[in-house]
Amino acid sequence: MTNDTRSYCLVQKLESTLKHAVRLITLGHFGMEVMNPKWNRIYGHVLGEPGSTFWSGPIDRGGKPYFCPKGWKRYSLKVADNEAEFDRLWGTWHIVYHGTKGEFVGAILQSGLKVSTSGCYLKRPSVYVSPSIEYCAHPRYSRIWQKPGSGKYHQLVFQCRVNPRVVSNKNVHPETLLRDKTVLIDPNFTNKELEWVIPSANREDEYITDDIVCYGLTIRSSDEHPDKLSSSHWWSVSHCWP
């Protein structure tokens, strides 16, 4: 089997899995025409894991580090006609994540991320994002589903690009979930940089569409409850859990 054939089979498998997820995990209602399966990815835990993408260490994205989202599958959204257009529009933007409930996916795909008007760091309507997928995976942000009859658990987090122009030291803040502040949430980041508060351009805006683009649905599926995963070790000393 050639590499091209393997890639095609992997894309077909991921596309089929997403359709199954939409039908059975209740991810909201949206058409598959919004998807771009060419860029679907399975992110492995180690180098050489069959059928997966993996790298160690950070990749630079607009001057900010991007780490492999180990253990997650990305279902790519169609936000550009081709790779060149995507790179031209958002290639130098930072990669961040936004956890959400599955039933909100359709609305987010249609309108963008909705601003919040309350929160620890809010001075104006804003959207919270994080460079850490593990921080966004906390059930406070990413609702846990269990598919009937399968026993599997699922979580969803949006993968996004954010305009570097709207990111500064003034809107990068510490985590707000830990009871025990000595625990490190994600070894790739300090706890002091986990909440990015992206303000709307205008106070009247209900959604942010110009400075944040959602370009991937990342889903984590596991046989055991997500709080048993090693990357979720910090949940037990956090607020809002169990």
Image (cartoon, rainbow, N blue to C red):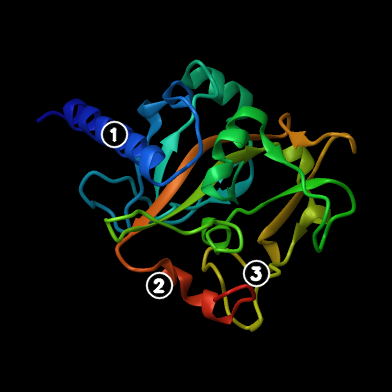
User: Which numbered marker is on residue 230?
Assistant: 2
Q: Which circle's residue, 3 or 2, is located before the other in the chain?
A: 3
Residue on which the image places disc 1: 16
Dot 3: within a 10 Å radius of its alpha carbon, few (fewer than 14), some, or many (20 or more) residues? many
| Secondary structure beneath label 3 | helix
Callout 3 amino acid: Asn
| C-alpha separation, residue under disc 3 versus residue under disc 2 | 18 Å
Q: Which circle's residue, 1 or 3, is located before the other in the chain?
A: 1
Q: Which circle's residue, 2 or 1, is located before the other in the chain?
A: 1
| C-alpha separation, residue under disc 2 versus residue under disc 1 | 28 Å
Q: Residue at x 18, y 32 (%)?
A: 6
Q: Residue at x 82, y 60 (%)?
A: 121
Decide which of 161, 100 is in the foreground and name it: 100
Residue on which the image places disc 3: 191
**x and y percentages locating residue 21 in the rendered image:** 37, 42
Instruction: Find out whether the residues at labels 2 and 1 contact each other: C-beta distance under 8 Å.
Output: no
Name, please, the residue furthest toward the front.
148
| Secondary structure beneath label 1 | helix
Left or right: 27 in relation to 44: right
Decide which of 155, 86 is in the foreground and name it: 155
Residue 65 vs 176, above or below: the answer is: above
Callout 1 amino acid: Ser
From the image, which quarter does the C terminus lie in? bottom right
Residue 172 vs 179, above or below: the answer is: above
